[in-house]
Amino acid sequence: MKSTNSRAMEIQQVTGLKPKHFADLVRASQLIFDPSGGVFGRQFQVDLSVFGLSNHVIDNLRQLGQKYQYASPHIPIDIIWEQLTPETRSWFIDHKNIIWKIEEAFPARDED
């Protein structure tokens, strides 16, 4: 799958999503997939329904988080967009300005 600037620009124009929204989504997906950050014995429970996430959207974001578990969140827009289900895309557009709050719902990770 080749990333193209024109496809990314089209997605941004149609949806109103910006690169920062996609980076927030990737970071949130990584946390949804692995809330412990790979630290053995750490267990966290976060009620994701407060963010309007259905089980289907959570499953789609977990898959995304698993795929990009150790990646930089700055993945090309069109690459991420293609991996989102229609329901996840709708949720993403509707909640683009609160996605960063998902990350805040989890305990901070030591990323040094």
Image (spheres, helix red, strand yellow):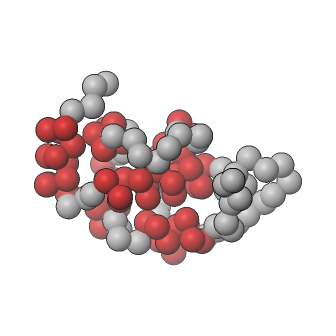
Residue 78 visible in this rendered orientation of the protein: yes
Q: In the image, is 11 to the left or to the right of 34?
A: left
Q: In the image, is 67 to the left or to the right of 90?
A: right
Where's residue 78, x and y in %? 28, 39
Question: Relative to the observer, which residue lies in front, 38 or 86?
Answer: 38
Residue at figure coordinates x 81%, y 58% from the top left: 42
Question: Relative to the observer, which residue lies in front, 53 or 75?
Answer: 75
Where's residue 60, x and y in %? 47, 46
Where's residue 69, x and y in %? 58, 41
Residue at the far right: name it. Answer: 41
Residue 52 visible in this rendered orientation of the protein: no
Compared with residue 14, is residue 95 higher up or lower down, i.e. above or below? below
Q: In the image, is 85 to the left or to the right of 31?
A: left
Residue at figure coordinates x 28%, y 25% from the top left: 2
Residue at the far top: name it. Answer: 1
Total number of numbered labels?
0
